[in-house]
Image (cartoon, rainbow, N blue to C red):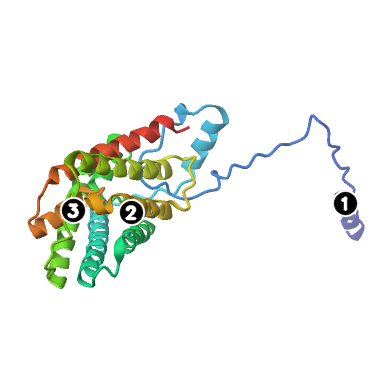
């Protein structure tokens, strides 16, 4: 038995190594996306793998099958949109009121930073539940281009508007502002205001679409990028139109304060800008 054991060991040790030749070399290609298990926010429907060719189609197919399949009930998504919009609008309006009541202590930069930070932390918190749109213009654009089921559009928009109205009345009840500056009212001409809201919303949705729906995009910093875009647009259009970029942002304070001056601009320009921004990225993406 001992001799048999040694014989076996010897056999195991003295296996002739395989010579490496051009015919038996093994090439291993590791796709970083195949190892990823991150969800793709906003991309509720994956693109058809048939649209891709060759090795890219294989990688796309394998990567999608490796994703965890998380089914979130619509009621939870709607609740997330309501709470997210409430927190966003409450934060922005509170900052504006503090700036008015304390002689400009926040400044335009402070208001822009407040809005950008609110969007950033909310995206990090809720994007895996509902996509964290918090904006009817975003939801409309996502629905038009197939990233949001059409049946979800109305519940999303209703939740966002209700969240904004609730936040606006909460802010009004807490601070009792004498100057209802929380409403977005154009301080420039109608045409200029329309195009400012159109372009800023265009830019916002161009960034969102690029980062959230394209599998080739870098997604690790999506929340930071979208928050930075909000800050940038607030600095560009804040003094002129209030930089709404969001029908819910306008509707809630308008109802709370009773100020509806040229509200149609925000209801029309922002959805059009959102669809155009999304379409522009779809047209140029890989």
- The residue shown at (32%, 50%) is 236
CB atoms of marks 1 and 2 within 8 Å: no
Report the residue that reaches farthest toward the left. 258
Given residues 85 and 130, the one toward you in this image is: 85
Q: Which residue is mark 1?
A: 13
Tell me the SS state at disc 3: loop
Q: Out of 12 and 87, give the one closest to the viewer.
A: 87
Distance between mark 1 and mark 3 Cα atoms: 80 Å
User: Mark 1: which secondary structure?
Assistant: helix
Disc 1 versus disc 3: nearer the observer: 3
Q: Secondary structure at mark 2?
A: helix
Instruction: Bin the neighbour count of mark 1 within 10 Å (Cα to Cα): few under 14, some 14-19, many 20 and up.
Output: few
Q: Label 1 to label 2, Cα distance in Å? A: 72 Å
Q: Which residue is mark 3?
A: 184
- Please tell me how many numbered marks the rendered image carries: 3
Horizontal side, residue 224 vs residue 104: left or right: right
Q: Give the residue at x 84% y 39%.
A: 18
Name the one closer to the observer, 197 or 17.
197
* Quarter the N terminus occupies: bottom right
Q: Which residue is mark 2?
A: 235
Of the image marks 1 and 2, the number of the one nearer the N terminus: 1
- The label shown at residue 265 is none
The label nearer to you, 1 versus 2, is: 2
Residue 143 in view here: no
Q: Which tag is nearer the camera, tag 2 or tag 3?
A: 2
In percent of width and height, residue 86 lies at 22, 60
Place of residue 98 in the rendered image (x, y in percent of width and height, measured from the top left): 23, 69
């Amino acid at each position: 038995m001992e001799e048999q054991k040694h014989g076996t060991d010897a056999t195991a040790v003295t296996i002739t190594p395989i010579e490496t030749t051009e015919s038996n070399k093994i090439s291993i290609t590791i796709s970083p996306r195949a190892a990823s298990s991150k969800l793709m926010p906003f991309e509720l429907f994956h693109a058809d793998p048939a649209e891709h060719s060759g090795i890219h189609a294989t990688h796309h197919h394998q990567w999608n099958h490796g994703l965890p399949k998380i089914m979130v009930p619509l009621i939870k998504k709607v609740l997330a949109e309501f709470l997210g919009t409430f927190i966003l609008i409450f934060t922005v309006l509170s900052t504006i009121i503090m700036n008015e009541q304390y002689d400009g202590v926040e400044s335009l930069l402070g208001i822009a930073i407040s809005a950008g930070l609110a969007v950033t932390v909310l995206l990090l918190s809720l994007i895996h539940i509902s996509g964290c749109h918090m904006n009817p213009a975003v939801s409309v654009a996502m629905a038009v281009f197939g990233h949001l089921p059409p049946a979800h559009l109305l519940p999303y928009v209703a939740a966002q508007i209700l969240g904004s109205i609730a936040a606006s009345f909460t802010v009004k009840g807490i601070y009792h502002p004498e100057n209802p500056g929380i409403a977005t009212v154009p301080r420039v001409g109608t045409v200029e205001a329309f195009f400012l809201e159109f372009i800023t919303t265009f830019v916002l949705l161009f960034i969102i679409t690029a980062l959230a729906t394209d599998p080739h995009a870098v997604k690790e910093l999506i929340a930071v990028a979208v928050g930075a875009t909000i800050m940038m647009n607030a600095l560009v259009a804040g003094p002129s139109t209030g930089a709404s970029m969001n029908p819910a942002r306008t509707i809630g304070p308008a109802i709370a304060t009773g100020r509806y001056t040229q509200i149609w601009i925000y209801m029309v320009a922002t959805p059009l800008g959102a669809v155009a921004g999304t379409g522009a990225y779809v047209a140029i993406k890989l």
